[in-house]
Amino acid sequence: MTQKTDVRQGTLTFMVFKSLEALGPLHGYGIGRRIEQTSRDRLALNYGTVYPALLKLEHEGFITSIARRSNYRLTRAGRNQLKKETRQWEETTAIISRFLRPGEQSS
């Protein structure tokens, strides 16, 4: 059995955005399951952190809740934030990759 990894600080928002972008409106449990499934159940997701994160994103205007079951969807501001965070994560992963493969660095 593979050991699960904790969700790294600062990654949950991005995974929520990407889940909503990929699947459209979802409730909190559905978002959590999407994150777990996408990680092939390698991430140990604490659902006690998902809902506060959703409330924070809603308060910031990046997502909105619809219907009684509190399905969430991205707002226009959320889509813009997702684009910004995608660029930032691409840059960050490129930098981290250089540390993982130091012999492959170019001058």
Image (cartoon, helix red, strand yellow):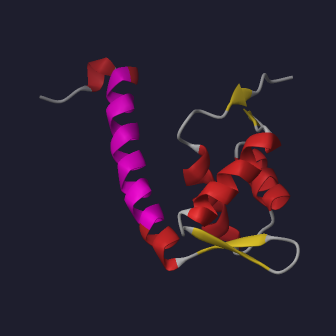
- Judged left or right of residue 47, residue 13 is left
Residues 74 and 35: in front is 74
The residue located at (59%, 63%) in the rendering is: 59
Whether residue 40 is visible: no
How would you classify the magenta stretch by its main secondary structure? helix
Residues 93 and 73: in front is 73
Residues 89 and 72: in front is 72
Give yes or no for residue 88 being in the magenta stretch: yes
* 24 w.r.t. 86: above or below: below
The residue located at (56%, 34%) in the rendering is: 9
Q: Which residues are magenta?
A: 81-99
The residue located at (80%, 41%) in the rendering is: 48
Residue 90, image x, y percentages: 38, 48
- Judged left or right of residue 39, residue 46 is right
Q: Quadrant of the N terminus?
A: top right
The residue located at (71%, 71%) in the rendering is: 23
Residues 50 and 41: in front is 50
* 90 w.r.t. 82: above or below: above
Whether residue 50 is visible: yes
Residue 97, image x, y percentages: 38, 31
Residue 18, image x, y percentages: 59, 60
Residue 11, image x, y percentages: 56, 43
Give yes or no for residue 12 being in the magenta stretch: no
Number of numbered discs visible in the structure rendering = 0
Q: Residue furthest left?
A: 107
Q: Quadrant of the C terminus?
A: top left
Q: Residue furthest top?
A: 103
